[in-house]
């Protein structure tokens, strides 16, 4: 239920950028690739799609060696609230899923951890060059599907194509 409320706020909140992009009736679509790290957005290689002021971002990072397999995937929804030439002020809602499988060759043992982190907060996107952007976000997160709420921080570096 709270997810639907947050999604409704993202979609219906007016922004100055949305009015500017829709004057000619066309959608402004941007694709970006990069790297990102966050406790609730996930970490690793990142792809971002922005349609007008709504952004969708996914992060993915696998790590495999003889002792462990670790996979992380993150999904983030962003909404630009204030946009100018060099910065964008935004809000975000994020989820990251972690799968960790630790195993020992010497002693037959296995430890498996699977958990979900969820976050919500605000951020600033800096437009460094025409095609280079850096974002930093902060807010509150719920970790490992517990009732504990704590601070979170997220960051990403993207190239628009």
Image: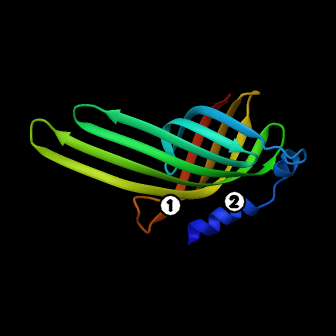
Tell me which residue sits at (59%, 41%) in the image. 155
Residue farthest bottom in this picture: 1
Residue farthest right in this picture: 23
Foreground label between 2 and 1: 2
How is the structure coloured here?
A: rainbow
**Which disc, if any, is residue 87?**
none
- Find numbered disc 1 in the image and state the secondary structure of the residue it sits on: strand
Q: Quadrant of residue 156?
A: top right
Tell me which residue sits at (80%, 37%) in the image. 86
Mark 2 or mark 1: which comes first in sequence?
2
**Which disc, if any, is residue 10?**
2
In the image, residue 90 sits, relative to residue 157, either above or below, namely below
Tell me which residue sits at (57%, 46%) in the image. 154
- Locate residue 87, reporting x and y percent: 77, 41
Q: Quadrant of residue 64?
A: top left
In the image, residue 115 sits, relative to residue 37, either above or below, namely below
- Locate residue 70, reporting x and y percent: 34, 40
Question: Callout 2: 10 Å neighbours few (<14), some, many (20+)?
Answer: many
Quarter of the image with the C terminus in it: top right
- Give left or right: position of 19 versus 161: right
- Locate residue 36, reporting x and y percent: 55, 38
Q: Which residue is mark 1?
A: 150
Quarter of the image with the N terminus in it: bottom right
Residue farthest left in this picture: 107
- Find numbered disc 2 in the image and state the secondary structure of the residue it sits on: helix
Question: Is disc 2 in contact with disc 1, using a CB cutoff of under 8 Å?
Answer: no
């Amino acid at each position: 239920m709270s997810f639907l409320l947050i999604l409704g706020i993202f979609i219906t909140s007016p922004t100055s950028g949305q009015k500017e992009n829709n004057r000619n009736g066309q959608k402004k679509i941007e694709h970006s690739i990069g790297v990102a790290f966050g406790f609730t957005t996930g970490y690793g290689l990142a792809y971002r799609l922005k349609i007008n002021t709504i952004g969708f971002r996914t992060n993915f990072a696998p790590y495999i060696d003889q002792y462990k397999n670790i996979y992380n995937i993150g999904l983030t929804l962003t909404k630009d609230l204030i946009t100018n030439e060099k910065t964008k002020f935004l809000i975000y809602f994020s989820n990251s899923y972690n799968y960790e499988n630790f195993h020992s060759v010497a002693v037959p043992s296995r430890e498996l951890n699977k958990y979900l982190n969820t976050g919500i907060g605000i951020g600033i996107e800096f437009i460094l060059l025409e095609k280079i952007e850096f974002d930093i976000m902060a807010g509150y997160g719920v970790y490992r599907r517990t009732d504990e709420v704590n601070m979170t921080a997220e960051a990403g570096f993207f190239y628009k194509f």
